[in-house]
Image (spheres, helix red, strand yellow):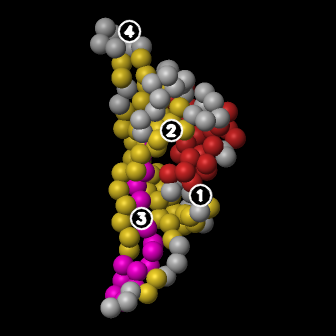
Amino acid sequence: MKSGIKAYLLAGTALKAALASATSVYSFPAPQDAAMPYLVLSEVSDAIQNTIGETLDIKEESWQVDVYAANDLQAEAVKKLVIARLNVADHVEMGSYTVTSCTYSGYAEASDLEMNGSESGAIRKILTFDFIRDNEVTPITP
């Protein structure tokens, strides 16, 4: 799923143009020399939905997208583009998966500012998205 999310994000031309390069979406941890702005993807949780007699293979997943930027204006612009790209309500292909729903579910600020009051350093905005993806119905054999 991670590679599908990454490809889907980078297929958004406005978001891709706002990032430092065409490859500025990383798995945790990002390279130390990554140019800003960039994104870091991390899976937070996942669960498979089951019913009596079958596994539906409907998976609920939460993913964290961290936005790193040199200043708050840049970080806020990239944040809005990520939300616009991922907050989808109907069947979207992300890699080999069909995502039936992706909902923006949370935000936190976690900037790594220097302690001298100069407010220089990396601005970090943490976004959380809840995905529902489905594949096929698989019967459970006793």
Outermost residue toward the front? 142
For the C terminus, the quadrant is bottom left
Q: Are marks 2 and 1 in contact (CB under 8 Å)?
A: no
SS class, disc 1 = strand
Which image quadrant is residue 55 in? bottom left
Mark 3 = which residue?
A: 60
Q: Position of residue 113 (x, y in %)?
A: 36, 18
Q: Which residues are magenta?
A: 50-65
Q: CA distance from mark 2 to mark 3?
A: 22 Å
Label of residue 94 in the image: 1
Rendered view: 51 above or below 17: below
Would you say residue 72 is visible in this rendering?
no
Would you say residue 89 is visible in this rendering?
yes
In the rendered structure, which disc, 1 or 3, sits on the residue that comes first in sequence? Answer: 3
Q: Amino acid under label 4?
A: Ser
Q: Amino acid under label 2?
A: Tyr
Q: CA distance from mark 4 to mark 3?
A: 42 Å
Mark 2 = which residue?
A: 26
Q: Residues within 10 Å of mark 4 (few under 14, many from 20)?
A: few
Q: CA distance from mark 1 to mark 3?
A: 14 Å
* Mark 2 or mark 3, whichever is nearer to me: 2
Label of residue 118 in the image: 4
* Mark 4 or mark 1, whichever is nearer to me: 1
